[in-house]
């Protein structure tokens, strides 16, 4: 499934909720459904800098696709990273790098996060793109 299709699905899902309390509850549910990251990846090397809470992000490369796993010690943040993983996992490095993140504005996420959580969101996206750059470079060499 393409990144754009997944993003559109997420926008549709969030549009079903009338208020932000319902959307937060939905994000919490998404966080609970996040596949568990292997504990060996819960290291300082995999912590995303710039997040208020601890967020671990790990990537593997399999058959030209980047596979992400993540976890967080904060329930809302776990929901945010679950959304990002849903969009970007099982995609090629090139499509990850070319993807826009307009869906975040479309669901109103950034404007409903505290400044520190919004910074964390930007840091998560940046780290996802950094993994894509690394794997793309690996492919080309």
Image: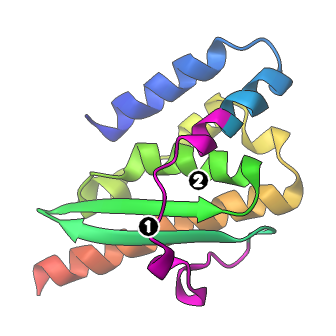
Secondary structure found at label 1: helix
- What percent of the width, then of the height, locates residue 51? 74, 69
- What percent of the width, then of the height, locates residue 122? 65, 61
The figure's colour scheme reads: rainbow
The stretch in magenta equals 29-50
Asked whether 37 falls inside the magenta stretch, the response is: yes
Give the label on residue 139, or none: none
Say whether residue 19 is left or right of residue 104: right
Say whether residue 126 is left or right of residue 133: right
User: Do residues under tags 2 and 1 come within 8 Å of each other at their CB atoms?
Assistant: no
Say whether residue 108 is left or right of residue 4: right
Q: Please, is residue 9 above or below residue 124 in the view?
A: above
The residue sitting at 84% across, 62% down in the picture is 116
Give the label on residue 129, or none: 1
Q: Please, is residue 83 above or below residue 35 in the view?
A: above
Q: What whole-number distance in Å separates the C-alpha atoms at marks 2 and 1?
A: 14 Å
Secondary structure found at label 2: helix
Residue beneath disc 2? 81
Q: Residue furthest front?
A: 39
The residue sitting at 64% across, 11% down in the picture is 16
Q: Earlier in the sequence, mark 2 or mark 1?
A: 2
The residue sitting at 51% across, 49% down in the picture is 84
């Amino acid at each position: 499934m393409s990144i754009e299709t997944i993003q559109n699905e997420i926008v549709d899902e969030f549009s079903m909720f009338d208020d932000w309390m319902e959307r937060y509850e939905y994000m919490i549910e998404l966080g609970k459904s996040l596949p568990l990251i292997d504990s060996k990846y819960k290291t300082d090397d995999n912590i995303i800098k710039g997040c208020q809470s601890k967020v671990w992000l790990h990537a593997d490369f399999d058959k030209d696709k980047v596979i992400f796993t993540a976890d967080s010690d904060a329930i809302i943040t776990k929901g945010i990273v679950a959304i990002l993983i849903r969009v970007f996992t099982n995609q090629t490095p090139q499509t990850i790098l070319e993807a826009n993140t307009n869906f975040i504005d479309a669901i109103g996420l950034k404007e409903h996060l505290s400044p520190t959580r919004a910074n964390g969101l930007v840091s998560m996206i940046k780290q996802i793109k950094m993994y894509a750059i690394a794997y793309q470079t690996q492919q080309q060499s």
